[in-house]
Amino acid sequence: MDGVTDSLMRELLTRRMPFTYTVTEFLRVSNLTPPSHVFLRSVPELGAICCTKSTVPVGVQLLGGDANLMAESASRAASLGAKVVDINFGCPAPTVNRHDGGATLLKFPSRLEEIVSKVRAAVPKEIPVSAKLRLGWEDPTDIHRNAESVARGGASWITIHGRTKMQGYTPPAYWGPIGEVARSLDIPVVANGEIWTVDDLKRCQEMTGCEHFMLGRGALADPALVAECATFLGIPVSADASESSRDFSRWRNLILELIQMSRTAAEADRRTVARVKQWLNYASHRKTIEWFDSVKRTKDTADLTRSLTELGARYGLDSAKLAA
Ligand SMILES: Cc1cc2nc3c(=O)[nH]c(=O)nc-3n(C[C@H](O)[C@H](O)[C@H](O)COP(=O)(O)O)c2cc1C
């Protein structure tokens, strides 16, 4: 998720939640193939068999409309160590769409096919190429022709966010068409959109018949969701990622751990705080953290840590535990 799930967040979330797979934020391919240092800065996991330290695979997502540049970029990603290349045909941001990237390509099924097939041809055959789609630009029934195009281009699987670009992020997400596509294609389909609870996951599974699900905002808003979903799906959960609480102390521990990790990575203090606030913003929209107001004006990590300590006292957490 652009602006939130950078490599440090991927590290934290895969360490503490039983994800089985993650995808990078999109890397933009506009007028030229991103140089190696850009790939390595955005996806440091490339140097570690493209997995997080908790050995969760990380797909490298590319976004762009020029099939040749996308192919060259995919080839560079593969030569740097990418194990999966994912193509973004879903981003609804006007600046991205104006530059011929993301969801705007859903208007052109033949271009979807061309991009996927050139990317497919540019990387070794053991590297899967996947694509992320919305239901369409405006017409949700376009998903059928678009999914077929992407499959014809050679995608190994597709992920479908059950909304059109015009529907933005307004609920609901339409899972029905995802199921129709899943039944009509012989490649796996990953269902995505508006899974905030295990009940949502169950309903999504019933409606789509899918075996694979992508969690976006829900996983950020509720630190217990991934473990609950994994348990429901029968996925083994390691001890490190099995914590199922969603109370204040869980949040505080996650945030302090991220601050600690960013210090180790010598990250800019302001960047860490901005990332934490954006993360908590999702949770506050879902009303899962009534304490957000107390931290949303913090300016640096010292300030943020102080606020968490004060909140800890208010929530009856003893200071010895806090120090730990
Ligand atoms: C802030 C933000 C950034 C996102 N960035 C990306 C991205 O870089 N690549 C991508 O494929 N989807 C991106 N998405 C879309 C999500 O992956 C997902 O498809 C969407 O949020 C619906 O799923 P959810 O209801 O589980 O969040 C982003 C969504 C948000 C809210």
Image (cartoon, grey):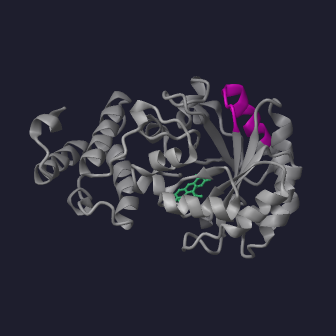
Q: Main secondary structure of the magenta part?
A: helix
In the depicted structure, whether residue 151 falls above or below residue 73:
below
> Residue 200 at what x, y percent from top left?
53, 63
> Residue 197 at what x, y percent from top left?
47, 60
Residue 83 magenta: yes
Check the image and name the residue furthest to the top. Answer: 48
Residue 126 magenta: no
For the C terminus, the image quarter is top left
Residue 108 in sight from this viewpoint: no
Magenta part of the protein: which range? 71-84
Residue 120 in sight from this viewpoint: yes
Residue at 45 percent of width and 45 percent of height: 227
In the depicted structure, whether residue 289 falls above or below residue 39:
below
Pick the residue in front: 147 or 67: 147
Q: Quadrant of ligand 1?
A: bottom right
In the depicted structure, whether residue 267 falls above or below residue 96:
above
Query: Would residue 281 be found to the left or right of residue 59 on screen?
Result: left
> Residue 306 at what x, y percent from top left?
16, 46
Q: Based on the displayed image, in which of its 4 quarters is residue 321 positioned? A: top left
Residue at 46 percent of width and 32 percent of height: 238
> Residue 105 at what x, y percent from top left?
76, 62
Residue at 76 percent of width and 37 percent of height: 128
Residue at 74 percent of width and 45 percent of height: 130
